[in-house]
Amino acid sequence: MKLETLAVHTGHEIDPGTRAVSPPIVLSSTFEREPNYAHDGHIYSRSSNPNRDALEKALAMLEDGQMAAAFASGQAATMSVLHALNPGDHVIMPDELYFASRGLLDAHYARWGLQASYVDTADVSAVRAAIRPNTKLLWIETPSNPGLRVADIAALAELAHAHGAVCACDNTWATPLFQQPLALGADVVTHSTTKFIGGHSDVLGGCVVAKDAASEMAQRIRGYQQMGGAVPSPFDCWLLLRSIPSMPVRVRAQCASAKKIAGWLMGHPRVEVVRYPGLPTHAQHAIAQKQMSDFGAMLSFEVKGGAQAALAVAAKARVFIRATSLGGFESLIEHRASVEGPATRTPQGLLRCSIGLEHGDDLIEDLRQALE
Ligand SMILES: *Cc1c(COP(=O)(O)O)cnc(C)c1O
């Protein structure tokens, strides 16, 4: 069966107790045992809950993995992968890593004894040169935030495996609809399910999906989830599962508009650069074509004139909402450098857009009047 059909039905089985078509929310934190103390699955909601189980089944299906672990945020999911390592291990991270992931590594994991190198993962030979005898994890984020650089997942996974390291890929921006990192060789995939999987800007969540449920990495992640307890509530799980059936249709429509908008921005005299992997002018367009079935709904562009010019464009937006985050049905525009603060590595003229479900023509008209 195709992804669209599986997305509608996986984890959405009819509830045997009530025949409810939409699954009930099980708020109970604890579950009764038989007189002989046997149990049929659930014991205590930190370890497992019916709504979380259903969500994890759907998430594992989306990425074609053997196991999914749902977390209370994307960052908690990232932390579970880092916690699976040992103090003294070395990790290779993209030099354009999600801002808060870099913050976690520098402010917390360095103190905890994890060594990190930041490398341009679009350059396979630079990654090869960064490998050390104690390199245990190679992290990919493609397309990257906010520069939409593309890294070659298959080549990097092969490189990681040749040196006994695990390859993890943050697939938040591409979505499982357009990019399947496990099939390309990655061992684990992470998501901020807050974004395209949630799709409604009303729930925070994250997940890790593992290709091999029996791997040491997968086992440690499950253990960290169940014992550490950074888990989503039953209602959060229900909201996320509600969103999965519409994800393929939403993301495809959002991507179609993003493509049009990127093409339109290319011809605008006030725009210096447009960053979208679907453009033939994108530096890694060939790799994107090889590993993505389409190019997603995120794009960035640089306005001539730096921070002031970019902020003035964002200020004039009427349809685009000035807010952080991405992947929801409403289009968002963001001046990343302002959000990231003094430590930012993002160009001052850059505006990041998450393209929503409004009509593409209205979004283009909004950018046209904002750029005037
Ligand atoms: C948002 C995001 C995260 C962090 O997820 P939260 O749900 O905000 O914790 C991680 N990686 C990427 C690429 C993101 O866009």
Image (spheres, rainbow, N blue to C red):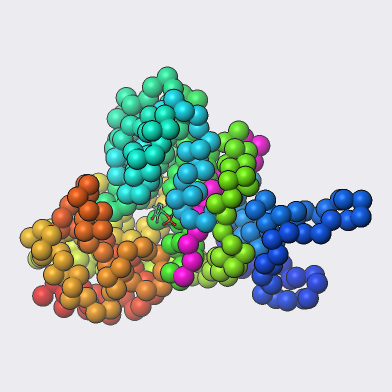
Q: Is residue 211 magenta?
A: yes
Q: Residue at x 75, y 55 (%)?
A: 42
Overall secondary structure of the magenta stretch?
loop
Q: Is residue 97 above or below residue 341?
A: above
Q: Residue at x 46, y 70 (%)?
A: 202
Q: Residue at x 31, y 75 (%)?
A: 360
> Which range is magenta?
202-215
From where the camera sits, is residue 38 visible? yes
- Residue 128 at x, y = what percent? 35, 27
The residue lying toward the viewer, choosing from 28 and 232, is 28
| 29 sits left or right of 37 in the view | left
From where the camera sits, is residue 2 visible? no
Residue 21 occupies quadrant: bottom right
| 367 sits left or right of 360 in the view | left
- Mark count: 0
Q: Is residue 245 magenta?
A: no
| 280 sits left or right of 249 in the view | left
- Residue 172 at x, y = what percent? 43, 54
Position of the N terminus, as image quadrant, is bottom right
Position of the C terminus, as image quadrant, is bottom left
- Residue 280 at x, y = what percent? 26, 54
Q: Is residue 8 above or below residue 178?
A: below
- Residue 80 at x, y = what percent? 52, 43
